[in-house]
Image: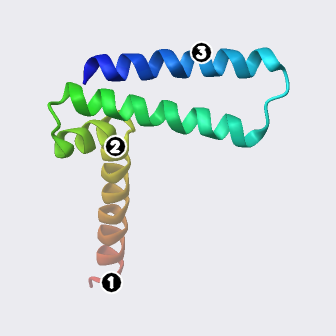
Amino acid sequence: MERMINEELKGLVLRQALSEQKGSVDGDEQCNVIADEVRVVAALVLGALGGNYAAMRDYLMISGGMFQEIAKINAQVVQRYNSAYFFIAP
């Protein structure tokens, strides 16, 4: 599988180089190249994690900062709740 992914990466690099060499690359071709690159990178990450989708999801959430955003939102909710509670209490 790793060999197949390496071959795909080489093909993507060649395809991107050829499209840049043309000079006029349309938006559809750029989107296709980017989508292929994302697919190959996702396959590499999944392969590195032994095919464990949950681990890949967690890795992407951690590297993307999603857990930090969730913590900030939770802190804001608690802060608002506490503020509202203290205003209502006698």
What is the quadrant of the C terminus in the image? bottom left
Q: Residue at x 21, y 25 (%)?
A: 48
Residue at 27 percent of width and 82 percent of height: 89
The residue beneath circle 2 is 68
In the rendered image, which residue does mark 3 sit on? Answer: 14
Q: Which residue is mark 1?
A: 88
Q: Earlier in the sequence, mark 1 or mark 3?
A: 3
Is label 1 or label 3 in front? 3
| Image: 16 above or below 66 | above
The x and y percentages for residue 75 are: 32, 55
The residue nearer to you, when weighing 35 against 65, is: 35
Colouring chosen for the image of the structure: rainbow
55 sits left or right of 68 in the view: left
Residue 85 vertical position relative to residue 58 in the rendered view, above or below: below
Name the residue type under label 2. Gln
Residue in view at x 29 percent, y 63 percent: 78
Q: Position of residue 3 (x, y in %)?
A: 30, 16
Q: How much space separates mark 1 and mark 3, taking CA atoms?
A: 66 Å
Tag 2 or tag 3, which sits nearer the N-term? Answer: 3
Q: Which residue ends up furthest to the right in the rendered image?
A: 24
Q: Amino acid at mark 1?
A: Ile
- Percent coordinates x, y for residue 62 in the rendering: 30, 37
